Amino acid sequence: MELLVALTIGVLTAVGIYLMLRQRSFPVILGLTFLSYAVNLFLFASGRLALNAAPIIGTTDTPTDPLPQALVLTAIVISFGMTAVILIMAIGGNLAAGHDRIDLGQDPRDDA
Amino acid sequence: MSLVLIAALPFLGAVLPGLLIRLGRTAAALAAGAVTLTALILLAIEAPAVLAGGVVKAQIDWLPGLGLNANFFLDGLSLFFAGLILAMGLLVVLYARFYLSDRDPLGRFYAFLLMFQGAMLGIVLSDNILLLLVFWELTSLTSFLLIGFWKDRAESRQGARMALAVTGGGGLCLIAGMLILGHAAGGHDLTTILTAKTAIWSSGLYLPALVLILIGAFAKSAQFPFHFWLPHAMAAPTPVSAYLHSATMVKAGIYLMIRLWPVMSGTFEWFVLLVGTGLFTLLLGAWVALWKDDLKAILAYSTISHLGLITLLIGLGSESALVAALFHILCHATFKAALFLSAGIIDHETGTRDITRLGGLRRLMPISFGITAIAGLSMAGFPPLNGFLSKELFLAETTEVIWPNPWIVAVLATLGAALSVGYALRLLVKGFLGQVRADYPHPPHDPSPGLWAAPALLASLVVLIGLFPNLTTRWLLHPAASSASRRDVFPNIALWHGLDVPELWMSLAGIGGGLMLLGAYPALRALRDRMPRLDAKRMFDAVVDPMAADARKVTKALHNGSFTRMLVLALLVILAATGFAWVSGTHDIGTRPGLAMQPLMATICGILALASLATAALHRNRLLALILTGVVGLLIAPIFAIFSAPDLALTQVAVEVVTVLLMLLALRFLPKATPAETQLPRRLFDVILAATAGLGMAALAYAMLTRAPAFPSISQFHLEQSKPGAGGTNAVNTIIVDFRGFDTFGEIIVLGIAALIIFALSQTLLKSPEVHRKLAALPPPAAGDPHPMMLVSGVRVLLPMALLFAAYLFLRGHNLPGGGFVAGLVVAAALLLQYLGSGYDFSQSRQRRDHHVVIAAGVLVALLAGVGPWVMGLPFLTSGFTYIDLPPLEKFELASAMIFDLGVFLCVLGAVLLALDSLAGLARVDRPGPRPKKGRKR
């Protein structure tokens, strides 16, 4: 199962990076979302994998590490905030510039 | 403790002028004056103990592990400088009120000035040298702000930049030197260092520490070869020049040299470096001052010269020379500040500072003439003014120097005296004597008393100190010199020593020489104009400009506006670094036993991988890509759930729903498809790059998962204490709301700020007419029926159920999976569904509270849970809990952390709703109308 999770993290990272290397804002945002998935999963995995060991006192004798879970929980919520901010920036850029390219310099109007 | 207050007061008070400027310029000046006066009174309260020979201390442990503590002390030397800083500050505050014009932002000026004052006080009151360094840098920064105060003038900006570069660069050397010194002395407090002379001298680190510290001190105190920044700093408003660049800041280096005098002086290196530099600077400054026509430039070079004089005296290493140095600091501060302020008056009233365009002002501006004449003659060293006394002391000291031979230093000092007589008299003669002219830029007359009061007071001090030196200064000089030298030094300064002392004849020779210089001035000037000259600014620019150009080139090469390119570069660097680690280190698979494969897990991961790859392949169709992304996000939740993280699974599902909704809304304002822009090779390159990174991450994750943690996790503590310490059985929740509550507090604030940014950006977009037009031109949504009956009814039934579920999640969160984050997201999602189903107006009309209020309430509730324990004398965010037995209910537990969790809940709810509401606001632009309306109607 460890290999499975590791490969999943790898696939999510690769897709995230590939999308972030695109030229338009929307795929970049999706890429960032994928990268967040990968990073959150990786951080979570740093507590190692365990079955039926939720860190609820009294339900199990060998609870898993709760600390990465607490970190990832807030990270998930913060990622949402970040995604939302970038979305409004992308919208603003698209409305103001008339296109949603992320690189400057391709449109002569950008140099102004 | 009042020492801390004295240093902190100007910083705290710096906000006052900025606020009170709305009530008028006088209010701002009064505020700045009141702050300075309060600090001065506090200092005066401490003074009697210090004047009696005591030392007042105040200590606050800050980072004791690093040796960095907020330790302050006040001895005679600190008192001497602190008094000078505050008294001079008071005069400058008064003067600036009348000097700066109505167009200048006076509130900002006073704020900067007070901050500078606080930094300066910090330097002279710091016991801890690391703290001193912090204040030292602060003086450089505030000085930068004050020199560049008229920021629309090029010479202000350049002067400010040069001063910052030189004094800041010197500051870096000083940091190194001070750290070496602290290391050699075995402590970072001056009280320790000053008693560790043998340790420092025997450590072998004396010379490097000395050289580095002196570079810092020389740069600050404008000693050759760092002197050139000072004349360019004259672009500052004149009150700043008088205060910073004559009376106080440039004395910071001097202060440091005097402060370290007991442990650093007495060596040949100390003598050569200080006397040599001081003497050369003295001559150079005086020489250049002689040829300047700008009043402030003359005074600037004269200041350099006098600072050289003081440095020389400190370098001599005798107690009497130290007394002379301290006395001259006092005298120089009085007469030079008076001269600067007078120069400001002349500039203010005549419109020029060029003495070749002045002359005859004696008749037109008699008060200013009186002040300038007294101060100028004192600068030249005429009896019975204070400048004469300190020059006598100086000349007397130079006759004691026997290296390199018994007379050379004395002769050069006398030459310096002659030069200073020359430039001082030239200033007076050219500026004030002679015929009244008809071509002044403005018709000159004496200003209002507000402007001349400060220099007049200083000029009267010049006379008083000159006539009664012991009476006026001994009470201050005695403790200052004694604490500086750490011996009992009793100064005795007399106006008349008799005819058989050499300094009298040297003084007379200086005056005679100065008069001769003045007589031969036109001829000398012609000669001098033909000589080649070094321009320090051009040399500085020659060094700095190529560096700046290179830096710009590197920046442009790395950052050409292409996000993709930066990302690729960053990735390549990361891959190279990790590749190096891979090649140079071992990379086996670990031996930790793994879990047996589950078919369910394999299926989930398989679908997840397929959906991910499909997203990458099909990303041009944005709606499809978004749906696939949602699938991937939702599939992560069962992974969390299976691997014993129910809280994460819940949160992931809730966030995913909200995120996808948000992106759907955003897609309305973005193109629906991504055009194919990259060529195949480029795409292949990207695939290889992404695949390599993915493989690396997978390998890293696998290596980690197959190993036990390298050292035991601190989580054992959280698990053990979750129930007895925080009163909850859900360890994840107790970590979030209790053990690491402060982190969470920061996080909900970040989330709130993110929502406010989104709101602010959407409002800005709506304000732009062009954007507004584009929004209105968007095609209306293509759905046949925007609010189908099924959906409307469905979501309305769902709402109370969702609210109940959220309440359940919230209440059980402390013990079972749930909590404020998830509950907030669930309620937000349920409310969003109302918007989606029944439309904006329906939902909006039923909304009682602004989302902003909800966010603020959340932060405030969490804050309340944090500060509540203070009332009981407990630290921030201490939690408590109790069990309540309330029949017929089961016995239940009530924890104060739940209040904090309520804050989290409200903040998350408000933030999510505000973000979505802001985006929805863009969609609600009135189609035909030209102006945005923030209304409740469609």
Image (cartoon, rainbow, N blue to C red):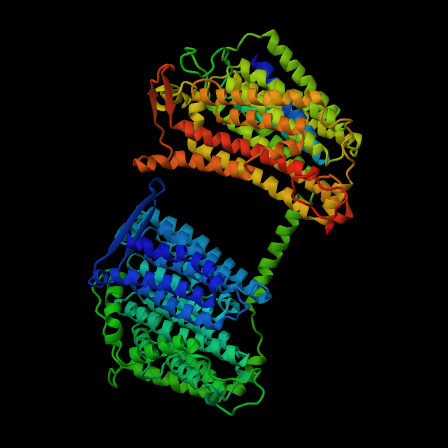
Q: What residue sits 60% from the left and 20% below the top?
A: B798
Q: Is residue B154 above or below residue B796?
A: below
Q: Tag count in the figure?
A: 0
Q: Is residue B598 left or right of residue B75?
A: right
**Can residue B573 be spotted in the picture?**
no
Residue A50 at x, y = what percent?
A: 50, 13
Q: What residue sits 33% from the left and 57% below the top?
A: B6
Residue B559 at x, y = what percent?
A: 66, 44
Q: What residue sits 37% from the left and 85% below the top?
A: B509
Q: Is residue A103 above or below residue A33?
A: below
Choose top left, top right, bottom left or bottom right for residue B570. Answer: top right
Q: Is residue B362 above or below residue B850?
A: below
* Residue B712 vs residue B58, the one in the foreground: B58
* Residue B277 vs residue A52, the one in the foreground: A52
Residue B149 at x, y = what percent?
A: 52, 63
* Residue B594 vs residue A81, the one in the foreground: A81
Q: Quadrant of the C terminus of chain B?
A: top right
**Can residue B626 be spotted in the picture?**
yes
Q: Is residue B912 left or right of residue B390?
A: right
Residue B731 at x, y = what percent?
A: 43, 20
* Residue B754 vs residue B893, the one in the foreground: B893
